[in-house]
Image (cartoon, grey):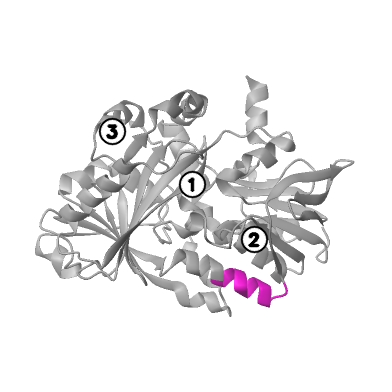
Amino acid sequence: MASADHVVVIGAGIVGVSTAIWLRRFGADVTLVDRGAPGQGTSHGNAGILAACAMVPVTGPGLVPKAPGMLLDRDAPLFLRWSYLPKLLPWLLKYLAHANDRDTRRIAAALTPIVGDSVDQHMALTDGLSAHRFIVPGDYVYAFERRADFEAGAYGWALRREAGFVPEILEGGAVRDYEPALGERITCLAVLKDHGHVLDPGGYVAALAQDFEAMGGVIRRADVRDIEVTEGRVTAVLTDAGPISCDSAVIAAGAWSLPLLARLGLRVPLETERGYHIVFEEAENGPRRPVMIDAGKFVATPMTAGVRCAGVVEFGGLEAGPSRAPFEMLRRHVRRSLPGLTSAREVEWMGHRPATSDSLPLIGEVGQTGVYTALGHQHIGLTGGPKTGRLLAGIMTGRPSNTDMTPYQPGRFQKSNQGR
């Protein structure tokens, strides 16, 4: 495409806004469209971590035999709405088929270029922009009740080490010297340097959107209904507020992208990982930096509003409201791990992470239609959004990187289906 072409980016979360900013920087005329305000969907509710070490997929070896026990354990971070299981099952079988060493290593190798330099990518995205004020570089900490719990994850830590992330291990009195908020149950820490967090994820994306407008970008509030393709090429994005003519389009609508992909003839095994958080507002005696509490697989992050405790995986689709059990599980683990934490009030939230069956995002063009995808980042959307936007904007404006984009091709599932 020529740099002056008009691009419509569908979806104003971190991935869509990042893509829109890089397209503007590369000279494109860009309209960002979403039915809601920028940053108020999934991008609002995450743990706020720039988790550069997050290249290890959930589907590691051993997941299949462990999963049933996790579903029956009220303190485990995995939940399922059983009424949704019949609809989930085809995706779930494909997902669990990757829970082996070969696929885990392949997925980790493909995720590393997307997340491994996250802090640098957020810094580059916000260079000269007002949104820069939200980013806090620093340590990211994994907290364990026993050294044996850390050693039980040796497989994942080996993959992180291969990617250059080697933890410093703290035990005994050094644990509370480093992080006084942690209770006596926590006896071992794995500290990772060169990470960071965001003080207000929703506010950050909203500020990025304002910066995008200041750069000459256009934001439209509308519900996208369809993509018009004429003689094989996109010509307009159709919304409830009327058509928006364009030369190319980017689908970055996360878990809500499936209907648009289907209209392009693209069948993608995409599900929602329902994530939960509780913000302990005006908190006292909370952690000084982000801490992953291993026992509950959630992160406690100091933010402007207070301490946000976020995590959990629940499979239950897009339509059902929040479940109570994940919130109560979070509260139990918070009391055990951060016993001194107090707050003025607690605010609950549930949202939808877009998860492909192979744990890799879709980044690239759908055939030769001029429609591109930037979605499917599961729980690493905030971490990998800026890099995704930069890579895709480069492809679209003739500035390709040296990153192998093959693992992220949006048509890869069609090839797999044809091979069966």
Q: Is residue 63 magenta?
A: no
Q: Is residue 253 left or right of residue 302?
A: right
Circle 1 residues within 10 Å: few <14, some 14–19, many ≥20: many
Q: The disc labelled 3 sits on which kind of residue?
A: Met
Name the residue nearer the viewer: 413 or 309: 309
- Work out which quarter of the rendered image holds the C terminus and state it: top right
**Which secondary structure type mostly characterizes the magenta part of the structure?**
helix
Q: Is residue 39 left or right of residue 99?
A: right
Q: The disc labelled 2 sits on which kind of residue?
A: Thr
- The CA distance from mark 2 to mark 1 is 18 Å
- Work out which quarter of the rendered image holds the N terminus and state it: bottom right
Which residue is situated farthest in the top direction here? 420
Q: Is residue 328 visible?
A: yes
Residue 13, located in which quarter of the rendered image? Answer: bottom right
Residues drawn in magenta:
207-216
Q: The disc labelled 1 sits on which kind of residue?
A: Arg
Name the residue carrying label 1.
353
- The CA distance from mark 3 to mark 1 is 20 Å
Name the residue nearer the viewer: 404 or 31: 31
Q: Residue at x 54, y 66 (%)?
A: 205
Give x and y (percent) for residue 51: 41, 58
Closer to us: mark 2 or mark 1?
Answer: 1
Determine whether the residue tagged by mark 1 lies in a helix, strand or loop: strand
Q: Is residue 210 magenta?
A: yes
Give x and y (percent) for residue 362: 61, 45
Above or below 329: residue 289? below
Give x and y (percent) for residue 49: 40, 61
Name the residue carrying label 2.
19
Q: Earlier in the sequence, mark 2 or mark 3?
A: 2
Name the residue nearer the viewer: 135 or 40: 40
